[in-house]
Image: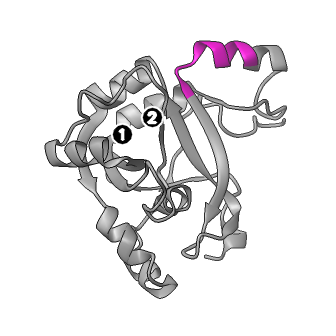
């Protein structure tokens, strides 16, 4: 499949019948205890928005292969599919899209009420160059952040060594890249244009 064959808006993730893996990058004081204990430490705030990314390469772009300050520890966070689907169904795009929302007022109201923000950003290749299709990231706050940490969490792995190894060459990155496949957007999610819009 070439880049031209990939839908412009498509969730791609490492997933099983029960779980989805998302990525986050943290400073060592949070990332290392989280990976060691399999849960977020008490210093991890459930009151702040936390962004999760199903795309490994988008995470690598964002954290500079785990070399940006404050993002030195990259975590692969495995969560329950029903939790991820709940987040997708409750997500509202961070910006107004005429083909997605009935009108600006409805979008603003949804934004105010929803604990989940969604953004479609350019996906990246193994050299971290932008691709012509988009990758989803979700911002979880309030109820969503609490559910993420306390109900959906299955396991946490430190993938920083993998990130550093992959950063050495595009060939190595291509060989070690986690296998991500299309993930279905649940019915009722407001992430893509409405039919006929």
Asked whether residue 122 is in view, the answer is yes
Residue at image location 37% in from the left, 32% down from the top: 83
State the image coordinates of residue 52 (x, y, percent, origin top left). Answer: 46, 42
The quadrant of the image that shows the C terminus is: top right
| Mark 2, secondary structure of its residue | helix
Magenta residue span: 108-116
* Residue 58 within the segment the image draws in magenta: no
State the image coordinates of residue 79 (x, y, percent, origin top left). Answer: 32, 41
* Residue 115 within the segment the image draws in magenta: yes
Label annotation for residue 23: none
Crowd rating for badge 1 (residues with CA inside 10 Å; few <14, some 14–19, many 20+)? some
Q: Which residue is mark 2?
A: 85
| Mark 1, secondary structure of its residue | helix
State the image coordinates of residue 39 (x, y, percent, origin top left). Answer: 21, 37
Q: How many marks?
A: 2
Q: Which quadrant would residue 153 be assigned to in this image?
A: top left
Q: Which residue is mark 1?
A: 81
């Amino acid at each position: 499949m070439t880049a031209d064959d990939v839908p412009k808006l498509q969730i791609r993730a490492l997933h099983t019948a029960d779980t989805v893996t998302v990525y986050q990058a943290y400073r060592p004081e949070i990332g290392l205890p989280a990976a060691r204990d399999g849960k977020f430490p008490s210093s991890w705030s459930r009151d702040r928005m936390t962004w999760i990314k199903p795309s490994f390469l988008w995470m690598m772009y964002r954290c500079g292969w785990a070399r940006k300050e404050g993002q030195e520890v990259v975590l692969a966070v495995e969560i329950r599919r029903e939790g991820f689907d709940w987040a997708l169904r409750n997500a509202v795009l961070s910006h107004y899209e005429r083909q997605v929302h009935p009108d600006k007022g409805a979008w603003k109201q949804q934004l105010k009420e929803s604990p989940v923000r969604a953004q479609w950003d350019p996906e990246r290749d193994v050299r971290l160059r932008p691709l012509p299709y988009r990758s989803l990231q979700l911002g979880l706050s309030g109820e969503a952040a609490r559910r993420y940490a306390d109900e959906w969490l299955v396991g946490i792995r430190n993938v920083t060594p993998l990130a550093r190894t992959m950063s050495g060459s595009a060939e190595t990155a291509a060989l070690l890249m986690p296998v991500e496949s299309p993930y279905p957007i649940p019915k009722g999610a407001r992430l893509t244009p409405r039919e006929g819009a």
